[in-house]
Image (tube, coloured by chain):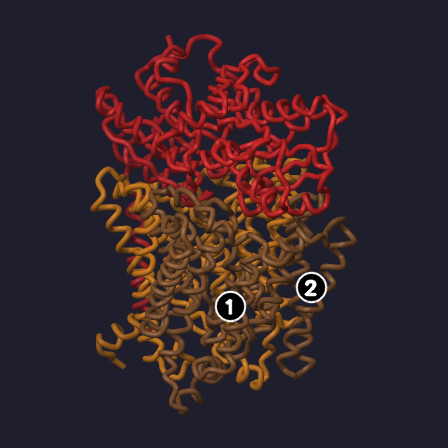
Chain colours: A red, B orange, C brown
Amino acid sequence: MKRVKLLSLVLAVIAVMSLCTGFTAARDAEDTRVPEGGFKIACSTGMGGNTWVAQYNEDFTQHCEEYKEMGLVSDYQIVNTNADLTEQINQCTALINSGIDCLILWPASTSGVQPIIELAKANDVLVIINNDPAAFEGTYCVCGNTTKFSEILTRWLATELDGKGNIVRIEGMAGNNSNELRVPVEDEVLAEYPDIVTLASGNGNYSQTVAQEVMTTYLSTYGDKIDGVLAQDVMGDGILKAYKNAGVTPTLMTGDYLKSYLKAWKETPGLRSCSVTYDAYIGCTALDVAINLLQGKTFKDEVLQANPADPSLINSIVVDPAYVVTLEGDQDAPWMEGLTSKAITLDEALELLEDKDDTAALDGGLSTEEVNALFE
Amino acid sequence: MRRPLSYYLRKLLKWSALPAFLLMAASFLIVKYLITGTNINASYITSFLNTNTAVICMSIGVTAVILTGGIDISLGALVSLCNVVAVQLMMHGVHYLPALIIVLLMAVAAGAVNGAVVSYLHVPPLLTTFATQTVFAGLALTVMRVPGGRIAGECTSFYYGKLFGFLPPTILFILVPVVIWKIYRRSPEGTRLYAVGCDEGKAFLSGINVERCRMFAYCFAGFCAGMGAIAYTFYVSAGDPDLGNSLDMRAISAAVIGGVSLSGGYGDVAGGIFGCLFFGMLTNMIVSFKVNVFTQNLLEALILLAGVLMAIAVRNRSMSLKGGLKREGQ
Amino acid sequence: MDRLAMFLPSVGASIVLIVIGQLIVPGFMSINNISSILMTTGLLGIMTIAQNTAIMSGNNGIDLSVGSVASLTAVVCPLLVSDTVGELLFAFLVAMLIGVAIGLMNSVGIQAFRIPPLIMTLIMGSVVDGAKLFVTKGSPATRISPILQSVSDPVIQPFRILTIFAVIMVVLAELMLHRSRFGRALLLTGDNPGAAAICGINTKLVGGAAYAISGGFAGIMGLFLAGYAGATTMSMGSSYTLLSVAAVAIGGTDLAGGKGSYVSCLVGALVLTVLTTILQALNVQEGVRLIVKGLILILIMVVNIYSHRRKS
């Protein structure tokens, strides 16, 4: 018995020693910086496995290849995780330790990625928070204007209703960052139109099937009383299916920027809808910003905007949606005020998507030249 | 009495956590030596442990539950709940010490709920913990709708500091449950718990209070989840209602790779710890191999499958060596 | 009589929930709503055929890969359908075969390597998810053709094509279970493998076939899901995994194996669907919704267990 205990003790000591070699070793020299001729870029997406992310990855990869040809990027890598914070931290730690120059980070948890930021700062890695705004000192944030997204849709709906009518609302996923930013904006705009009554509001969880079920329930409960539907994105097809199942033709609803929805909209006569893009190209904009910063350029005055997650931090580039699609494509409509977005018609939108799959999303963004112009 | 070397070798091979240990050691060595550009120094190991403490604690807890023949998939949601409660308490001015004690008590109480429903209401553990997972997740969302918040500065500086000059404080959160478990394991009650896992009917007939053993296992699992949650809260310094939700299956897989038998009665917590460390290293490896983003998940899952096959093959062999224990599979 | 006892708690629960639904949500009992609930129940019901088979085969049987299999066929198989019924049937055949293939891999792990079903199917699910991502490069099938989407078309209100197919499959499965040699072999293997072996049943083969069947039905369900949704997203089927386990449990199947009824599981699916629909219609915070759902689930299961104990 004693011998066995001794043996186990010896094994345990060996195991601990092999780990402790790391503890007692002196800190190694800083990894050598890659010369200006080519930066190492890494992108960590906090969500995986849906077409929007696939498009984001594709756009990003293409853009990196273009920079590679110009010699500005020597190596790039994309990792993804499905809302798993632990995995993202593990991945980013590995990335930072492999000696990257810049990390474009789409946080799996907007509050939980602090350790990654700290590690990046300790290793002189530039961090750009992308797509889902999060506020951390010492980083930059490049994201789409998610609140404007909802503001345009809500104002369009209110204008179409002439300020009067009954609506149902289908929101995204509770606790999701985008959702929590958009709902108050919708509330704010609707407050300006006291004659618009919200009959019911539910969560579609950004899922076509859940949105379909919720809409079916609303159609059964309220039927003719519904004058319009206010919904967030990636749920348009589900809502249309609910209408189809119920045998009712939709007349007024906010739409989606997926080609499948745009096609279905075209094939539904009498449907008035509005689609606002939430651009997957935002990753490329982040890359453009990163390349400029890595080359040592500084932002011009007044270019940086307040961080959507924490307005007291001025470190963000917030990009307006690229396109607003309506039947008329009116650039001067009330919901277009103050935007840099392009108003286009449904036909123009379908033309832009002509060679793409049905699952493609209408996409656009600031061109590289436009981003470069933001710097000295 | 002198014993031959083969005796000790056989004893080693019967160590339930051996496959997991080997996997961890192998992945550690691959990361250290085969992947260029990795500096495995103190800060690397510290941040590695920091990131994975929550999963490690969860797998310690879930091992205890599995040993009784049960399972617990609610621990991830419990971690989220503990995290948001801790953050909300601290943001409303509660001093961090009572806040953390409240959180730990709540975690144990949650475990007790699981244990009570399984033991006294006789609902199967998988379904019970599926339902409680939903409840805990719902409570977490009610306590904090959106990620955010801040915790007391002392907690963050403690966690990012050093114990005795060189140890990362996160080790404390892993050691405390392990020590508690080791003490319990050596006590007569601990042996009874293994007996319950091996064969509940016979254990009952031997006069063992089966319910009490189970209650301890589930409460202990809750406690572990609480410890892991506190560690994670210190690490990210904020709250998130979804914090731990994706970790359940990983903790269970780690425990199984660590040699615990899902029918109960065989295995130990060390295996689960090694399993979690292996998983962390695996993620590191996949990133460092610069695998295409669409191939990453497949590769990781395949390596995991291979790891489980090996672990279970070894375990089945050593279980039959021990003889007389309940076997898995037909 | 024993089989009827299995039904009663879940039938009772569905009636109670439907009445509550009508009280809380006006228009709940409308034909459109009922037909939608029946469709969703049908989808979950097909999944329960898969899950029930795995659980009944014993050995702590369970199939946690069904959701992943359904997601895979949902994003891949619609490509095979453009506009003819022939293509549609072919697509279903392919979906089933993909599911069977994955199920067989599960069987190999469980029977040959003696890996516990929980872990084997869990990891297999991850492998399938990874394979799906690898094969589709993140972009699911392009367009769901109208003929596939027509599964949502009504036949006789409130029954739609999907609902009718689901019910037919469940009834056929139930008949197979109680009238065919394989069905009886399955039940005996799950209940008492030793006795089954003595009777000359190849328990390894029966157990293995159970997971192949499970995979096959999961594959079929995935294609139906794509048709129902009218659009595909990558993780469409994932939520159905644990839901199918809950539905099977509510339906009274013993999780240890050997006893069960497909029809009863379908009723269990109905209970879950009605519960979810009512909660969706309520204008409350998502957190509250989840808490209520969890508590009601525990309640239903306790009632289930209690009523079974009383009978025995």
Location of the N terminus of chain B (image quadrant):
bottom left
**Identity, as a three-letter code, of the amino acid under mark 2:** Ser
Question: Does residue B20 appear left or right of residue A218 in this picture?
Answer: left
The tag on residue A32 is none
A174 or C71: nearer the viewer: C71
The residue tagged 2 is C14
A214 above or below A353?
below
Q: Nearer the viewer, residue A6 or A47?
A: A47
Residue A103 point in image, percent of width and height: 36, 30
Q: Residue at x 57, y 34 (%)?
A: A232
SS under mark 1:
helix
Q: Sequence-wise, which precedes: disc 1 or disc 2?
A: 2
Q: Which residue is mark 1?
A: C169
- Picture quadrant of residue A174: top right
Amino acid on which the number 1 mark rests in the picture = Met
Q: Tell me how far mark 1 sits from mark 2, CA to CA.
A: 21 Å
CB of mark 1 within 8 Å of CB of mark 2?
Answer: no
B122 horizontally vs C207: left or right = right
Residue plotted at (29% across, 71% down): B13
Secondary structure of the residue carrying tag 2 is: helix
Which residue sits at x=44%, y=84%?
C181
Nearer the viewer's eye, disc 1 or disc 2?
Answer: 1
B179 in relation to A78, above or below = below
Q: Quadrant of residue C189?
A: bottom left
In-front residue for pair B155/C287: C287
Instruction: Determine the residue located farthest toward the bottom in the rendered image.
Output: C198
Badge 2 density bin: few <14, some 14–19, many ≥20, Cα 10 Å: many
Residue C131 in view, yes or no: yes
Residue B157 coordinates in the image, percent (x, y)? 50, 35
Q: Residue at x 37, y 60 (%)?
A: C124
A27 left or right of A151 in image: left
Q: How many other residues sit within 10 Å of disc 1, few (<14), some (14-19) or many (≥20)?
A: some
